[in-house]
Image: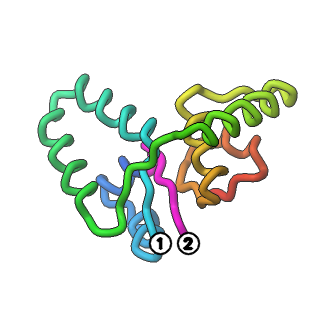
Amino acid sequence: MKVALDANRYTDLCRGDLEVAHILENADEVLLPFAVLAELRAGFALGSLGRENDQVLDRFLRKPGIEVLYPDDTTTRIYGRLYRQLRRQGTPIPINDLWIAALVVEHNLTLCSRDRHFDHLPQIEIV
């Protein structure tokens, strides 16, 4: 299983959440969408432990099997389709989460997240 890790579950992992640790240990690959990386770094910039949190994240990113995932032209097309789908359903989601969803769909990933608004996208498997 290839897993995309959302910011809330990365935070859970850092706080010792055994469920998230188990999911990631059993994953073939763990991908951190660029929007998640940006959200984390933005949060660190505002917090009092920014430098320490940034160092922990850098160590995490250097682990084997961990990779940052960036968009390309295909991602933007999927983003557009998902945007339309969510608007038609009347269930828009935050922009960063739409980028995450587009990358998850494009790369056929399982999403590790606590955000319930991803439930509006039945094409995404969530753990």
Of 72 and 38, which appears nearest the observer?
72
Of 10 and 63, which appears nearest the observer?
63
Q: Which residues are magenta?
A: 1-9
- Return the x and y of residue 56 as percentages of the image width and height: 19, 50
Q: Amino acid at mark 2?
A: Met
Determine the CA span between mark 2 and mark 1. 5 Å
Residue 32 left/right relative to 40: right
The quarter of the picture where residue 101 lies is top right
Q: Residue at x 64, y 59 (%)?
A: 108
Q: Which mark is residue 27?
A: 1
Of 47 and 54, which appears nearest the observer?
54
The quarter of the picture where residue 67 lies is bottom left
Residue 5 drawn in magenta: yes
Residue 121 left/right relative to 112: right
Q: Residue at x 29, y 53 (%)?
A: 14
Residue 24 left/right relative to 59: right
Q: Where does label 2 land, which residue?
A: 1
